[in-house]
Image: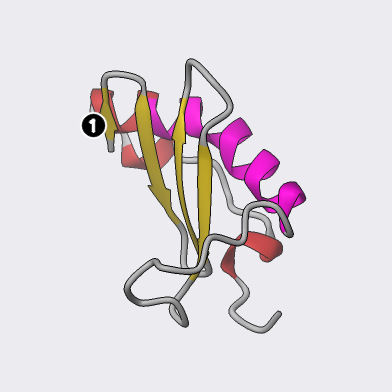
């Protein structure tokens, strides 16, 4: 989901919200943090970076309605066991 500069991406294991124009970012472990109250972005910077890199590709695919071109997710973005 994209609204102005705000981007929200959800994978099976993570939910990330970031502002594309600055460094504001929040990362939540899913499905454990159902209500998204425990921001773990400072402890999981590699996950934040991976999701931010995938953001533009997901946004483009969503805007064009092309689900078949979505990039394959790394195991670290889909594995619930941490």
Judging from the image, what secondary structure is the residue with disc 1 in?
loop
For image coordinates 41% across by 46% down, the residue present is: 9
In front: 20, or 65?
20
Asked where in the image residue 67 lies, by quadrant, the reply is top left
**Quadrant (top left, top right, bottom left, bottom right) of the C terminus:** bottom right
Left or right position of 68 against 47: left
In front: 8, or 41?
41
In front: 81, or 57?
81
* Above/below status of 26 relative to 43: above
* Above/below status of 27 relative to 69: below
Residue 59 spot, x, y in % from top left:
37, 29
Residue 36 spot, x, y in % from top left:
39, 66
Asked where in the image residue 37 lies, by quadrant, the reply is bottom left
User: What sort of colour scheme is used for the picture?
Assistant: secondary structure
Residue 4 spot, x, y in % from top left:
27, 19
Residue 57 on the magenta span: yes
Left or right position of 35 against 74: left
For image coordinates 53% across by 55% down, the residue present is: 27
Which residue is labeled 1 in the image?
Answer: 65
Residue 21 on the magenta span: no
Residue 71 spot, x, y in % from top left:
54, 41
* Above/below status of 6 relative to 17: above
Left or right position of 34 against 65: right
**Quadrant (top left, top right, bottom left, bottom right) of the N terminus:** top left
* Above/below status of 3 relative to 37: above
For image coordinates 52% across by 33% down, the residue present is: 24
The secondary structure making up most of the magenta span is: helix
The stretch of residues the image draws in magenta is 44-59
For image coordinates 67% across by 56% down, the residue present is: 74
Task: Tell me the crowding category of disc 1: few under 14, some 14 to 19, or many 20 or more residues within 10 angstroms, Cα based.
Answer: few
Query: How many numbered discs sit on the rendered protein?
Result: 1
């Amino acid at each position: 989901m994209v609204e102005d500069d705000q981007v929200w991406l959800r994978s099976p294991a993570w939910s990330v919200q970031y502002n594309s124009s600055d460094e504001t970012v929040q990362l939540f472990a899913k499905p454990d943090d159902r209500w998204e109250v425990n921001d773990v972005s400072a402890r999981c910077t590699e996950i934040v970076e991976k999701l931010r890199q995938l953001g533009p590709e997901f946004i483009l695919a969503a805007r064009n309605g092309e689900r078949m071109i979505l990039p394959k997710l790394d195991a670290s973005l889909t594995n619930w066991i941490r």
